Amino acid sequence: MQLTKATVSCTQTMHPKNLSIAGFSYELPADRIAEYPLNPRDLSKLLIYKKGTISESRYSDISSHLPGNSLLVFNNTKVVEARLLFQKPTGGTIEIFCLEPHEQYSDISTAFQQHGKVWWHCLVGGASKWKPGQVLQKRISSNGEEIDLEARYIEKKAGSFIIELSWQPAAMSFAELLHHAGAIPLPPYIKRKATATDSETYQTIYAKMDGSVAAPTAGLHFTENIFQQLRQKNISTAYVTLHVGAGTFKPVKADMLEDHEMHAEFMDVPATLIRELIDNIDGPVIPVGTTSMRTIESLYWLGVKLANEEEVNGLAQWEAYDHPIQDLPAKEALTGLLQWMEKNKMERLITKTQIIIAPGYKFRIAKGLITNFHQPQSTLLLLIAALMGNDWKMMYQYALENDFRFLSYGDGCLILP
């Protein structure tokens, strides 16, 4: 089935700060939100948008719809068991949701390798029943060994609590401790409790780097069978790491985008990936997921900052729109970034990005996107609108009318504008 329509021209002159979020909404019935994934994963439906034309397929056939010589960029972050439940002596339950490490740690990998004690930014369910300084205790078993875990309320911050987690014996790293003591954090719009199978299904098959509290869901559909087909068609694959924070679920509550603070996330990119982007810069570079998209576009702006003799200390929310240099060729920006890494003997670039991609953004590296269907009034939907203009409305309306499943465990789309 095909639907053809001339692509709507969307030449944006206004700064995205001036966008009203009300223009990026649609009616999403609760029964269209997928509660469970399909089995096998690659049976999920695939909507293909190509230059104003919509057609349908399955993820299992995605290789036949990708341009020749494509480079697909995947996010290999791994979802951690970030939900910890503690029972108070009085019987009440306190839920601690581990968001991201405290600023005392240089990067997220260092924080996860701590032994015995760690400080973490957390959301706390039932926080009103937990007083500062009060210690919660939990005993867990691991391979026949008893481990005593304690949580101490340190400080309340804007949007999170600082919690000290300590455990004895201290031989286990924090990443290992969460694996034994925690639970997979399903998105808040999935209204059921996580099950044992979610530990596998809410994880990509190529997940490698501990650190996310949400899955890069576009990659959930990919199977070894798909990767084999990609290899047979000479479609290249590469990997970045962007640790997905809980902010990815956060709807934009402000009326105007300038009043919304984008969540910052850790990114970890090997020099080999930057070389691959340089080699393929004139071809179809297609990120798998909005997190991969934000990572590779952030690389461009970090290269721009270096060209302007600025420090590479992360990327702030509006820098891509406000930077005095707007026309540096992508190959030049990435080459400068790579040379800086080589000069400083860096095999990996580890920093944070807060980039918000919204209508008005000019894509420097990505030529398309593989992604799921996103929540109304979310920054993820803004990214889709930036890529395809007002045609996002046509695409989402088609998906709603043709039984596509929405959000994390739902179906997805291949966008080739």
Image: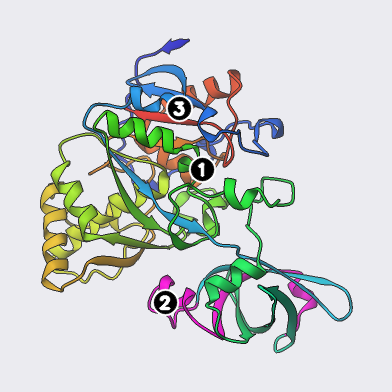
| Outermost residue to the right | 90
Check disc 1 and give the amino acid type: Ile
Magenta part of the protein: which range? 102-131
Within 10 Å of disc 1 (Cα), the crowding (few <14, some 14-19, many 20+) is many
In the image, is 159 to the left or to the right of 330? Answer: right
| Of callouts 2 and 1, the N-terminal one | 1
Check disc 2 and give the amino acid type: Thr
**Against 17, is 359 above or below?**
above
The image shows residue 343 at horizontal and vertical percentages of 11, 71
**Against 117, is 244 above or below?**
above
Determine the secondary structure under disc 2. helix
Q: Residue at x 63, y 57 (%)?
A: 185
**Is residue 327 visible to us here?**
no
Disc 2 to disc 3, C-alpha distance: 37 Å
The answer to if 116 sits in the magenta stretch is: yes
Toward which corner of the image does residue 81 lie, by quadrant? bottom right
In the image, is 199 to the left or to the right of 105? Answer: right
Disc 2 to disc 1, C-alpha distance: 37 Å
The image shows residue 26 at horizontal and vertical percentages of 58, 32
| Of callouts 3 and 1, the N-terminal one | 1
The image shows residue 250 at horizontal and vertical percentages of 57, 53
Q: Which residue is mark 2?
A: 110
- Comparing 100 with 309, the one in front is 100
Within 10 Å of disc 2 (Cα), the crowding (few <14, some 14-19, many 20+) is few
The numbered disc on residue 179 is none
Q: Which residue is mark 1?
A: 21
Nearer the observer: mark 3 or 1; the answer is: 3
The numbered disc on residue 60 is 3
In the image, is 333 to the left or to the right of 360? Answer: left
- The type of colouring in the image is rainbow
